[in-house]
Image: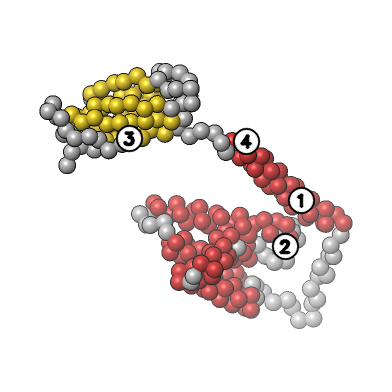
Amino acid sequence: MKPVRAGVLAGLTVAASLAVEFGPLPVSLPGGLLLAFVLPGFALNEAIFRPARRDIGVVERAVLVPSLSLAVLVLGGLVLWTAGGHLNRTSWMLVCAVTTLVATAAAYHRTLRAAPAPAGEKSPPVPRNTQERLIRDVLPLTLAVLLVAGAGVWSYADSVHTYDVPVSTLSAQPPGPVDADGNRAVRMSATGLGAGEWTMVLSDPAGVEVGRQEVAPDGAGGWSGEVTVPGDQRVTVNLFRGDEAAAFRTLIISAVP
C-alpha cells in the first residue's frame, strides 16, 4: 500500500470513529456505515492480497470488502462477548477502527519490505481488459445482483401477504384486593387464539400447580375471564394449546407487596 493511500485510509478511519462516538446522527450514521461495511474490509484486502495479483479481479475485491468487514464485526463481537465486554456503540467502533488501522499498517509495512525492481528492468505490461476478463468479472456480479433483487422482491411479496396475520396475546388487568381467604381476583384476556383446546395453568414460584382453567376462544379468537390467584405469592400463568408440553404464552402476576 502506498504511503498516500495508507495515510488517507488511516485518517478516514480516525474521522469516522470520532463521528460515531461524538458526532450527531447525520455525521455518525455515515461514519458507522463506513466502519461497518467498508474500511476494515478494504484494509484487510490490501493487507492480504497483493495489488498486482491477476487472479483476484475487480469483482472479487469489491465483494471481499463488505464480506471481510462483516466478518470483523462477527468475530470481534464474539471475542468481546467471550471476554465479558459490553457490545455497544463504542466497542463496535473500537473493533472496526483497530482492525482497520492494524491492517493498514501491515499493508504499508509489506510495501516497504518489497524488493525494488533492478535498475533498467521494466515492469511487465499489464494486460488490458479483454472480453473474456469482462465476462469473468461482470457475470458473477450480475448474478449476485439478480439474486439479491429476487430475494428482495420475494421478501416484499411475502410481507404483503403476511402482514395482517393475527398475533396471539395474553394480558391481565391489575389484580383486585385480597379477600378474606387471602386470594385476589384477576381479570385476564387473550386474543389471536386459533381453534382448538386451550388450557390455562397457574403455578407458584416452585412450579407447583395451584390452579387450572379451560379456555374456550370465541369465533374471533378472543377470550376473557376471571381467575383467582393467591395474594401472598407470585403466580406464573401458562397458556397451553392442546397437548403441547411447551407453554404458548406466559404471564407472571406478582405477589402483594
Image mark for residue 128:
none
Using the numbered discs, state the Cα–Cα distance from disc 1 to disc 4 in whole angstroms: 29 Å
Distance of label 3 from label 1 (alpha carbons): 54 Å
| Other-residue count near label 3 (Cα within 10 Å), few / some / many at <14 / 14–19 / ≥20 | some
- Give the quadrant of the C terminus: top left
Q: Which element carries disc 1, helix, strand or loop?
A: helix
Q: Return the residue found at the far bottom.
A: 119
Q: Position of residue 63 (x, y in %)?
A: 67, 56
**Whether residue 97 can be seen here:** no
* Residue plotted at (69% across, 43% down): 153
Q: Which residue is mark 4?
A: 161
Q: Is residue 176 left or right of residue 19?
A: left
Q: Secondary structure at mark 4?
A: helix
The reply to whether discs 1 and 4 touch (Cβ–Cβ < 8 Å) is no
Q: Earlier in the sequence, mark 3 or mark 1?
A: 1
| Residue at the spot 40% in from the left edge and 26% down from the top edge | 223
Precedes in sequence: disc 4 or disc 3: 4
Q: Amino acid at mark 4?
A: His
Mark closer to the chain start, 2 or 3:
2
Q: Is residue 186 left or right of residue 46?
A: left
- Left or right, 180 with respect to 97, comes to left
Residue topped by disc 1:
142
Which residue matches tag 3? 172
Tell me the distance, in whole angstroms, between the alpha carbons under discs 4 and 3. 31 Å
Q: Nearer the viewer, mark 2 or mark 3?
A: 3
Q: Earlier in the sequence, mark 1 or mark 4?
A: 1
Residue 201 position by quadrant: top left
3D distance between C-alphas at marks 1 and 2: 23 Å
Q: Do tag 4 and tag 3 residues touch (Cβ < 8 Å)? A: no
Q: Nearer the viewer, mark 4 or mark 2?
A: 4
Query: Crowding at label 2, few (<14), some or many (≥20) Cα neighbours within 10 Å?
Result: few
Report the amino acid beneath label 1: Thr
